[in-house]
Protein backbone atom coordinates (compact mmCIF):
# COMPACT_ATOMS: atom_id res chain seq x y z
CA UNK A 1 0.00 0.00 0.00
CA UNK A 2 1.27 3.46 -0.79
CA UNK A 3 0.65 6.90 0.64
CA UNK A 4 1.43 10.18 -1.10
CA UNK A 5 1.56 13.69 0.25
CA UNK A 6 -0.91 15.32 -2.15
CA UNK A 7 -2.12 18.52 -0.48
CA UNK A 8 -1.24 20.86 2.38
CA UNK A 9 -3.79 23.38 3.61
CA UNK A 10 -2.98 26.71 5.23
CA UNK A 11 -5.46 28.94 7.00
CA UNK A 12 -5.24 32.73 6.82
CA UNK A 13 -7.22 35.71 8.04
CA UNK A 14 -7.30 37.09 4.49
CA UNK A 15 -7.00 34.98 1.36
CA UNK A 16 -5.86 37.39 -1.33
CA UNK A 17 -2.61 38.68 0.27
CA UNK A 18 -1.35 35.15 0.92
CA UNK A 19 -2.15 34.01 -2.61
CA UNK A 20 -0.35 37.07 -3.99
CA UNK A 21 2.78 36.24 -1.97
CA UNK A 22 2.78 32.55 -2.94
CA UNK A 23 2.49 33.55 -6.59
CA UNK A 24 5.22 36.18 -6.37
CA UNK A 25 7.78 34.16 -4.40
CA UNK A 26 7.26 30.64 -5.74
CA UNK A 27 5.95 31.41 -9.22
CA UNK A 28 2.75 29.47 -8.57
CA UNK A 29 -0.69 30.05 -10.04
CA UNK A 30 -4.18 29.35 -8.78
CA UNK A 31 -5.57 26.19 -10.35
CA UNK A 32 -8.94 26.01 -8.63
CA UNK A 33 -11.29 27.78 -6.25
CA UNK A 34 -13.93 25.57 -4.67
CA UNK A 35 -17.30 27.28 -4.15
CA UNK A 36 -18.33 24.32 -2.00
CA UNK A 37 -16.24 25.49 0.97
CA UNK A 38 -18.63 28.42 1.38
CA UNK A 39 -20.92 26.09 3.33
CA UNK A 40 -18.19 26.02 6.01
CA UNK A 41 -17.95 29.81 6.03
CA UNK A 42 -14.69 29.77 4.04
CA UNK A 43 -13.20 30.75 0.73
CA UNK A 44 -10.19 28.98 -0.74
CA UNK A 45 -7.69 28.68 -3.55
CA UNK A 46 -5.51 25.75 -4.60
CA UNK A 47 -2.13 26.25 -6.23
CA UNK A 48 -0.51 23.22 -7.88
CA UNK A 49 3.14 22.51 -7.06
CA UNK A 50 3.89 19.96 -9.75
CA UNK A 51 1.26 17.30 -9.05
CA UNK A 52 0.77 18.36 -5.41
CA UNK A 53 -1.16 21.30 -4.00
CA UNK A 54 -0.95 24.12 -1.52
CA UNK A 55 -4.42 25.19 -0.48
CA UNK A 56 -5.19 28.37 1.41
CA UNK A 57 -8.51 28.82 3.19
CA UNK A 58 -9.82 31.94 4.90
CA UNK A 59 -13.01 32.60 6.89
CA UNK A 60 -15.66 34.79 5.30
CA UNK A 61 -18.01 34.79 8.28
CA UNK A 62 -17.67 34.67 12.08
CA UNK A 63 -17.46 31.53 14.19
CA UNK A 64 -16.03 29.09 11.67
CA UNK A 65 -13.74 26.14 12.43
CA UNK A 66 -11.03 27.86 10.40
CA UNK A 67 -11.47 31.08 12.33
CA UNK A 68 -11.25 29.27 15.66
CA UNK A 69 -8.07 27.55 14.50
CA UNK A 70 -6.57 30.94 13.61
CA UNK A 71 -7.31 32.14 17.13
CA UNK A 72 -5.95 29.01 18.75
CA UNK A 73 -2.66 29.20 16.86
CA UNK A 74 -2.38 32.99 17.04
CA UNK A 75 -2.58 33.83 13.35
CA UNK A 76 -1.99 32.49 9.86
CA UNK A 77 -0.38 29.09 9.62
CA UNK A 78 -0.65 25.43 8.72
CA UNK A 79 -4.00 23.70 8.91
CA UNK A 80 -4.21 20.27 7.27
CA UNK A 81 -2.02 17.46 5.95
CA UNK A 82 -3.90 15.60 3.22
CA UNK A 83 -2.61 12.27 1.97
CA UNK A 84 -3.66 10.14 -0.98
CA UNK A 85 -3.82 6.36 -0.59
CA UNK A 86 -4.21 3.53 -3.07
CA UNK A 87 -6.83 1.64 -1.04
CA UNK A 88 -9.20 3.36 1.38
CA UNK A 89 -10.79 0.34 3.04
CA UNK A 90 -7.74 -0.79 5.07
CA UNK A 91 -7.03 2.82 6.08
CA UNK A 92 -10.56 3.11 7.41
CA UNK A 93 -10.26 -0.19 9.25
CA UNK A 94 -7.05 0.96 10.89
CA UNK A 95 -8.67 4.17 12.09
CA UNK A 96 -11.60 2.18 13.49
CA UNK A 97 -9.22 -0.22 15.28
CA UNK A 98 -7.53 2.74 16.96
CA UNK A 99 -10.92 4.28 17.85
CA UNK A 100 -10.02 7.57 16.19
CA UNK A 101 -12.92 9.94 15.68
CA UNK A 102 -13.60 11.42 12.25
CA UNK A 103 -14.37 15.05 11.68
CA UNK A 104 -15.57 14.33 8.15
CA UNK A 105 -16.12 11.25 6.01
CA UNK A 106 -17.38 11.10 2.45
CA UNK A 107 -17.54 8.18 0.06
CA UNK A 108 -18.60 9.00 -3.48
CA UNK A 109 -18.29 7.25 -6.81
CA UNK A 110 -15.07 9.12 -7.64
CA UNK A 111 -13.52 10.32 -4.36
CA UNK A 112 -13.39 9.09 -0.77
CA UNK A 113 -12.32 11.37 2.08
CA UNK A 114 -11.56 10.70 5.74
CA UNK A 115 -10.58 13.62 7.97
CA UNK A 116 -9.45 12.62 11.46
CA UNK A 117 -10.08 14.44 14.71
CA UNK A 118 -6.91 16.31 15.78
CA UNK A 119 -7.56 15.54 19.44
CA UNK A 120 -7.16 11.87 18.60
CA UNK A 121 -4.20 12.23 16.23
CA UNK A 122 -2.30 15.19 17.66
CA UNK A 123 -0.27 17.52 15.47
CA UNK A 124 -2.71 18.95 12.94
CA UNK A 125 -5.72 17.90 10.95
CA UNK A 126 -4.76 14.68 9.16
CA UNK A 127 -6.78 13.51 6.19
CA UNK A 128 -6.41 10.32 4.14
CA UNK A 129 -8.28 10.27 0.84
CA UNK A 130 -8.72 8.00 -2.16
CA UNK A 131 -9.16 9.13 -5.75
CA UNK A 132 -10.71 6.69 -8.19
CA UNK A 133 -8.55 6.59 -11.31
CA UNK A 134 -5.78 8.45 -9.50
CA UNK A 135 -3.02 5.86 -9.59
CA UNK A 136 -0.56 8.08 -11.49
CA UNK A 137 1.22 10.74 -9.41
CA UNK A 138 -0.21 13.48 -11.64
CA UNK A 139 -3.62 11.86 -11.87
CA UNK A 140 -6.94 13.48 -11.05
CA UNK A 141 -7.53 15.03 -7.64
CA UNK A 142 -11.12 16.03 -6.91
CA UNK A 143 -10.38 18.86 -4.41
CA UNK A 144 -8.45 20.65 -7.18
CA UNK A 145 -11.25 20.47 -9.74
CA UNK A 146 -10.98 19.09 -13.25
CA UNK A 147 -8.78 21.68 -14.93
CA UNK A 148 -5.81 22.36 -12.64
CA UNK A 149 -3.00 21.21 -14.93
CA UNK A 150 -2.86 24.38 -17.08
CA UNK A 151 -1.96 26.26 -13.86
CA UNK A 152 1.13 24.14 -13.14
CA UNK A 153 4.30 26.24 -12.99
CA UNK A 154 7.63 24.57 -12.21
CA UNK A 155 10.21 27.18 -13.16
CA UNK A 156 10.77 28.24 -9.51
CA UNK A 157 9.65 25.25 -7.43
CA UNK A 158 8.64 21.82 -8.70
CA UNK A 159 7.43 19.69 -5.75
CA UNK A 160 6.64 19.50 -2.06
CA UNK A 161 9.27 17.25 -0.50
CA UNK A 162 8.28 17.41 3.17
CA UNK A 163 5.65 18.64 5.58
CA UNK A 164 7.00 19.69 8.96
CA UNK A 165 4.71 19.12 11.94
CA UNK A 166 5.81 20.75 15.18
CA UNK A 167 5.02 19.53 18.66
CA UNK A 168 6.30 19.73 22.25
CA UNK A 169 6.56 15.93 21.97
CA UNK A 170 7.86 15.34 18.46
CA UNK A 171 8.83 11.72 19.13
CA UNK A 172 5.49 10.78 20.64
CA UNK A 173 3.62 12.48 17.82
CA UNK A 174 5.70 10.69 15.18
CA UNK A 175 4.94 7.35 16.82
CA UNK A 176 1.23 8.18 16.90
CA UNK A 177 1.08 9.16 13.22
CA UNK A 178 3.20 6.15 12.31
CA UNK A 179 0.72 3.94 14.15
CA UNK A 180 -2.23 5.50 12.32
CA UNK A 181 -0.57 5.39 8.90
CA UNK A 182 1.17 2.03 9.48
CA UNK A 183 4.48 3.59 8.49
CA UNK A 184 7.76 3.07 10.39
CA UNK A 185 9.40 6.01 12.13
CA UNK A 186 12.93 6.84 10.96
CA UNK A 187 15.33 9.70 11.77
CA UNK A 188 16.61 12.38 9.44
CA UNK A 189 20.16 13.77 9.41
CA UNK A 190 19.25 16.16 12.24
CA UNK A 191 17.70 13.49 14.44
CA UNK A 192 14.11 14.50 13.70
CA UNK A 193 11.65 11.61 13.51
CA UNK A 194 10.21 11.19 10.02
CA UNK A 195 7.70 9.10 8.13
CA UNK A 196 8.67 8.33 4.54
CA UNK A 197 5.81 8.48 2.06
CA UNK A 198 6.01 7.59 -1.61
CA UNK A 199 6.77 11.14 -2.74
CA UNK A 200 7.69 13.11 0.38
CA UNK A 201 8.38 12.98 4.11
CA UNK A 202 6.43 13.91 7.18
CA UNK A 203 8.97 15.44 9.54
CA UNK A 204 8.29 16.01 13.24
CA UNK A 205 10.16 18.85 14.96
CA UNK A 206 10.15 20.66 18.28
CA UNK A 207 7.64 23.48 18.66
CA UNK A 208 9.82 26.48 19.45
CA UNK A 209 7.79 29.45 18.15
CA UNK A 210 5.24 29.59 20.97
CA UNK A 211 2.37 28.55 18.70
CA UNK A 212 2.01 24.97 19.85
CA UNK A 213 1.32 21.91 17.76
CA UNK A 214 0.57 22.23 14.08
CA UNK A 215 1.81 22.19 10.52
CA UNK A 216 4.72 24.60 10.87
CA UNK A 217 6.85 24.12 7.78
CA UNK A 218 6.86 23.06 4.14
CA UNK A 219 9.98 21.91 2.28
CA UNK A 220 10.05 22.55 -1.47
CA UNK A 221 12.21 21.26 -4.29
CA UNK A 222 13.62 24.47 -5.77
CA UNK A 223 14.51 25.08 -9.43
CA UNK A 224 15.49 28.76 -9.27
CA UNK A 225 16.67 29.72 -5.79
CA UNK A 226 17.92 33.17 -6.79
CA UNK A 227 14.61 34.21 -8.29
CA UNK A 228 12.78 32.87 -5.24
CA UNK A 229 15.00 34.66 -2.72
CA UNK A 230 15.02 37.92 -4.66
CA UNK A 231 11.21 37.94 -4.72
CA UNK A 232 11.03 37.06 -1.02
CA UNK A 233 13.48 39.85 -0.22
CA UNK A 234 11.28 42.43 -1.96
CA UNK A 235 8.32 41.33 0.14
CA UNK A 236 10.38 41.19 3.36
CA UNK A 237 9.66 37.45 3.62
CA UNK A 238 13.24 36.23 3.36
CA UNK A 239 14.54 34.81 6.63
CA UNK A 240 17.81 33.36 5.32
CA UNK A 241 19.31 31.75 2.23
CA UNK A 242 17.42 28.60 3.21
CA UNK A 243 14.08 29.88 4.48
CA UNK A 244 11.23 32.26 3.76
CA UNK A 245 8.20 32.92 5.96
CA UNK A 246 4.77 33.28 4.36
CA UNK A 247 1.41 32.98 6.14
CA UNK A 248 3.11 31.80 9.32
CA UNK A 249 4.74 28.86 7.51
CA UNK A 250 8.48 28.23 7.34
CA UNK A 251 9.24 27.38 3.72
CA UNK A 252 12.59 25.63 3.36
CA UNK A 253 14.32 24.22 0.30
CA UNK A 254 15.44 20.74 -0.68
Image: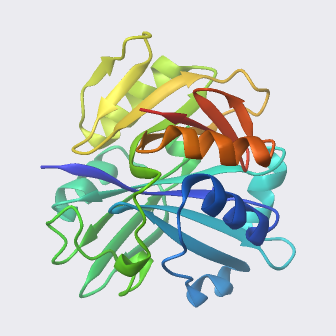
| Left or right position of 116 against 35 | left
User: Residue 218, can we see it?
Assistant: no
Q: Quadrant of the C terminus?
A: top left
Q: Residue at x 69, y 59 (%)?
A: 11
| Left or right position of 208 against 196 | right
Give the x, y percent position of residue 32.
Answer: 51, 81
User: Residue 251, can we see it?
Assistant: yes
Give the x, y percent position of residue 84.
Answer: 29, 59
Residue 107, above or below 20: below
Front residue of 1/192: it is: 192
Residue 24, above or below 112: above
Q: Residue at x 39, y 48 (%)?
A: 99
Give the x, y percent position of residue 217.
Answer: 57, 37
Q: Residue at x 66, y 37 (%)?
A: 244
Front residue of 246/85: it is: 246
* Rendered image coloring scheme: rainbow
Front residue of 198/31: it is: 31
| Left or right position of 251 against 139 | right
**Quadrant of residue 189 in the image?**
top left
Q: Residue at x 60, y 89 (%)?
A: 35
Front residue of 95/7: it is: 7
Residue 90, above or below 244: below
Residue 22, above or below 60: above
Farthest right residue? 62
Give the x, y percent position of residue 230.
Answer: 66, 42
**Quadrant of residue 88 in the image?**
bottom left
Amino acid sequence: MWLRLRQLALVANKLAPVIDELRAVFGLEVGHRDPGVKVFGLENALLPVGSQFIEVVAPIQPNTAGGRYLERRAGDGGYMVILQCDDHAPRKRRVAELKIRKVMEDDSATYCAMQLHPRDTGGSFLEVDFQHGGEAPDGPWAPAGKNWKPAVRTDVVRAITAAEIQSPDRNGLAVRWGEILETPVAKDAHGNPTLQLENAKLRFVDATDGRGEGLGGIELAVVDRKRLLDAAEKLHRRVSDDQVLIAGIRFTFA
